[in-house]
């Protein structure tokens, strides 16, 4: 796989960089026009401390694409073409003939730092499962204590713990906790708020809330240090009673009761499945097994639907609460039922076997950190998660936004640029991201109107992202254009890597919406998309497969689709529902580069006689005298061929065999560099040919020489890449 180019400085990658405008172009497109947008991608942009200058016609922000008239002190909006006068704040600069900073050429993305502080400080609520084993809870407590010093200054912190009872901790107050039964019947936010005493007018509410949310860390730290494992013993043959659903409901009621739009981040630390009260995913008895994809498909998972609906209902109270789930369990914890809490709000979803692992510790601390702290060992990178974000989209006349597939919620705000058919989360011009970071990428889809006469030469876009940055509100405005097919040929503007990632997001979105009904038709849809694209943009003589060829901007696309069909994003029946939820969640946040690696892993061969080089994902790449390095994003593998393993075990004097030494050290250096900047941390596998863990590598390899049968439009999953391409070609030219 070629390494995709970096994002441009605006954080935007389109599939079609030349926008189709004619009716025939639009009908032959095969896939919708879309872009991958990473709003906070670039830290190195102009920052302004002045108010935004807005168009009185469409409310878009002054930007470098606007024509300005310094003499008449006017600017023409590039989106709606209305002429606006400059505000008084700009006149002194204009008096001396200076161009305002937001219209200078390097200002396609600018960030405004607003004086307006947030209405209240952000709150971070830790929701901790106390049914954990002693060692698990001790490790989790250590990591939680470490994390508090990484929170933005001035944040509020709160603590909720649960087993069969939910305890809301009164930080520094008496009694130490308010207890709520885990099997609370007829869940009702108002009732929970009355139990917690958070009722009354705003001042009274704020006073009462300070029992639960502390602006100083000491009461929180001492409450965490005092935490003990659950006093309720499990019956023989039963799982611990965990009221995970009630714990999340109580936490949601707590923060939404204080302020309607209280900006809060709820972090769940769960050591096993919910077994008690609303949101239960499995009964306590170990004789009852956790649901699988096949049991859900056959409607045998009786608790699935009610649990899914229960967790989704928690989103109805407030758009400003984000949820992260950190699972530390060999068992599933019910992430699949809870997935919308993370996928709709921008929170993290990280599943690990245990809270004692460095994988958990480093992933969690990276997520919560804003700056690298030398005092926190092992945390080499930070995610810089910010809260309370919104994204607003403006577009030229003739362009309409159909929706976003990513970690956000539609705010259902109508506008002239909103299309009435939605892709993903649509029917709006504004979306809410309760949590956002430079690692959050959104797939934005558009509809181009073919009826404009004359057809435009270029079209304009403006994305306005508002978010809370360390206690201050910021607005980042990104404005850019794309030429239409009147100016640049469609073929030359095609970005096949962006296209496959957008296609993967469309596929996952369809699975998430109507999972089991659409699985078979989804594969057919992917094949049909590939064939239509090849028919439209390939060259061939009808009936002659040997004449088929694709231009350089399309050549990789069919093989990407081949790998997407085989990827865990679509081959869900090989995974548990929780793992599927984790894979889908991560893809729905990833940028183009990371998502390409997830779909089509990279494989590099190290040998004693040549420089390291990329090799194809094929069984023929398994050479005995080589070391292979596989990056599959969720895990990395260093694989030793049988001869290479013998050399390694012979403990050769590396002074005499420096070329062999390089072969062994190269993959380790590569892995270390990769681990230093990836979230969540991938699993690290070292294995030899023939060992059981070699399956992590071999399952990603093309089964050259083997063939499968017909399935979908093309072929089964066991087919080789060659067989797939041959069948696609046959259907294209036939
Ligand atoms: Zn305008």
Image: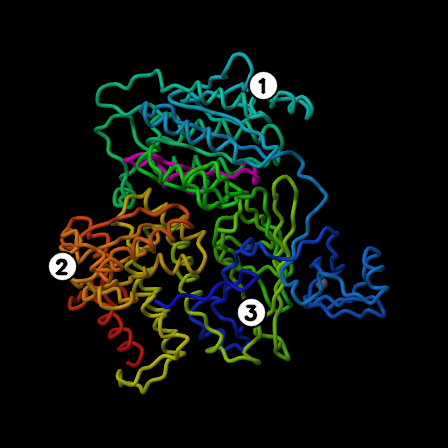
Q: Can you identify the residue that label 2 sits on?
A: 643
SS for tag 1? loop
Q: CA distance from mark 2 to mark 3?
A: 58 Å
- Disc number for residue 710: none
Q: Decide: is 403 above or below 411.
A: below
Q: Quadrant of ligand 1?
A: bottom right
Q: Residue 324 in magenta?
A: yes
Which quadrant holds the N terminus? bottom left
Q: Residue 511 at x, y = what percent?
A: 37, 53
Give the magenta-colored segment's residue range. Answer: 317-340
| Residue 165 image position (x, y, % from top left) | 41, 20
Quick check: 138 left or right of 390? left
| Residue at mark 3 | 448
Instruction: Tell me the mark number nearer the camera, choosing from 3 and 1.
Output: 1
Pick whichever of labels 3 and 1 is earlier in the sequence: 1
Q: Which residue is mark 1?
A: 197
Measure how far apart labels 1 and 2 are at the Cα level. Answer: 70 Å
For label 1, being within 8 Å of ligand 1 is answered no
Q: Verify CB contact (< 8 Å) between mark 1 and mark 2.
A: no
Secondary structure beneath disc 3? strand
């Amino acid at each position: 796989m070629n390494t995709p180019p970096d994002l441009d400085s605006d954080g935007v990658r389109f599939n079609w960089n030349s926008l189709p405008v004619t009716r025939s172009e639009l009908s032959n497109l095969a896939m919708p026009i879309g872009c991958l947008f990473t709003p906070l991608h670039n830290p190195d942009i102009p920052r302004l401390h002045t108010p935004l200058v807005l168009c009185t016609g469409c409310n878009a922000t002054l930007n470098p694409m606007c024509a300005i008239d310094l003499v008449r002190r006017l600017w023409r909006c590039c989106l709606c073409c209305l002429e606006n006068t400059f505000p008084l704040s700009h006149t002194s600069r204009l008096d001396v003939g200076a161009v305002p900073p937001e219209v200078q050429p390097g200002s396609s993305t600018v960030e405004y730092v607003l004086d307006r502080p947030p209405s209240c400080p952000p709150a971070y609520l830790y929701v901790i499962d106390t049914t954990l084993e002693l060692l698990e809870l001790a490790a989790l407590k250590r990591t939680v204590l470490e994390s508090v010093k990484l929170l933005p200054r001035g944040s509020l912190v709160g603590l909720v713990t649960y087993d069969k009872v939910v305890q809301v901790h009164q930080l520094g107050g008496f009694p130490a906790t308010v207890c709520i039964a885990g099997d609370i019947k007829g869940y009702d936010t108002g009732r929970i708020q009355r139990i917690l005493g958070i009722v009354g007018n705003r001042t009274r509410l704020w006073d009462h809330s300070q029992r639960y949310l502390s602006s100083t860390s000491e009461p929180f730290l001492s409450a965490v240090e005092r935490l003990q494992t659950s006093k309720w013993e499990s019956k023989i043959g039963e799982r611990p009673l965990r009221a995970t659903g009630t714990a999340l409901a109580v936490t949601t009621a707590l923060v939404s009761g204080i302020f309607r739009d209280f900006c809060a981040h709820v972090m769940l630390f769960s050591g096993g499945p919910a077994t008690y009260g609303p949101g239960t995913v499995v009964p306590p008895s170990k004789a009852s097994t956790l649901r699988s994809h096949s049991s859900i498909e056959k409607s045998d998972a009786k608790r699935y639907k009610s649990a899914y609906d229960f967790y989704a209902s928690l989103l109805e109270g407030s758009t400003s609460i984000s949820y992260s789930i950190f699972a530390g369990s060999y068992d599933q914890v019910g992430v699949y039922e809870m997935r919308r809490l993370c996928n709709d709000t921008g929170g993290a979803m990280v599943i690990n076997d245990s809270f004692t692992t460095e994988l958990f510790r480093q992933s969690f601390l990276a997520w919560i950190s804003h700056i690298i702290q030398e005092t926190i060992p092992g945390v080499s990178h930070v995610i810089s998660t910010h809260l309370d974000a919104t994204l607003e989209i403006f577009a030229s006349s003739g362009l309409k936004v159909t929706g976003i597939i990513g970690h956000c919620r539609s705010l259902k705000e109508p506008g002239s640029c909103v299309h009435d058919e939605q892709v993903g989360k649509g029917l709006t011009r504004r979306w809410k991201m309760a949590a956002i970071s430079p690692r959050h990428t959104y797939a934005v889809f558009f509809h181009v109107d073919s009826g404009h006469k004359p057809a435009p030469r270029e079209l304009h876009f403006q994305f306005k992202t508002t978010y809370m940055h360390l206690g201050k509100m910021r607005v980042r405005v990104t404005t850019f254009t794309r030429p239409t097919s009147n100016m640049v040929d469609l073929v030359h503007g095609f970005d096949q890597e962006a296209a496959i990632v957008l296609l993967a997001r469309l596929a996952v979105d369809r699975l998430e919406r109507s999972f089991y009904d659409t699985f078979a038709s989804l594969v057919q849809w992917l094949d049909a998309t590939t064939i239509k694209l090849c028919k439209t943009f390939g060259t061939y003589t009808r009936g002659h497969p040997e004449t088929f060829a694709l231009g350089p901007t399309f050549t990789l696309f069919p093989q990407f689709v081949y790998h997407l069909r085989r990827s865990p994003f679509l081959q869900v029946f090989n995974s548990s529902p929780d793992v599927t939820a984790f894979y889908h969640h991560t893809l729905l946040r990833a940028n183009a580069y990371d998502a390409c690696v997830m779909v089509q892993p990279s494989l590099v061969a190290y040998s004693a006689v040549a420089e390291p080089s990329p090799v194809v994902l094929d069984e023929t790449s398994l050479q005995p005298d080589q070391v292979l390095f596989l990056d599959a994003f969720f895990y990395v593998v260093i694989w030793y061929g049988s001869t290479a393993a013998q050399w390694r075990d012979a403990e050769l004097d590396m002074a005499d065999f420096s070329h062999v030494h390089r072969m062994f050290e190269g993959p380790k250096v590569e892995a270390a560099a990769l681990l230093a900047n990836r979230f969540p941390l991938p699993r690290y596998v070292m294995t030899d040919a023939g060992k059981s863990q070699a399956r992590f590598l071999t399952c990603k390899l093309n089964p050259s020489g083997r063939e499968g049968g017909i399935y979908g439009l093309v072929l089964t999953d066991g087919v080789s890449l060659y067989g797939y391409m041959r069948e696609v070609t046959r259907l294209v030219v036939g």
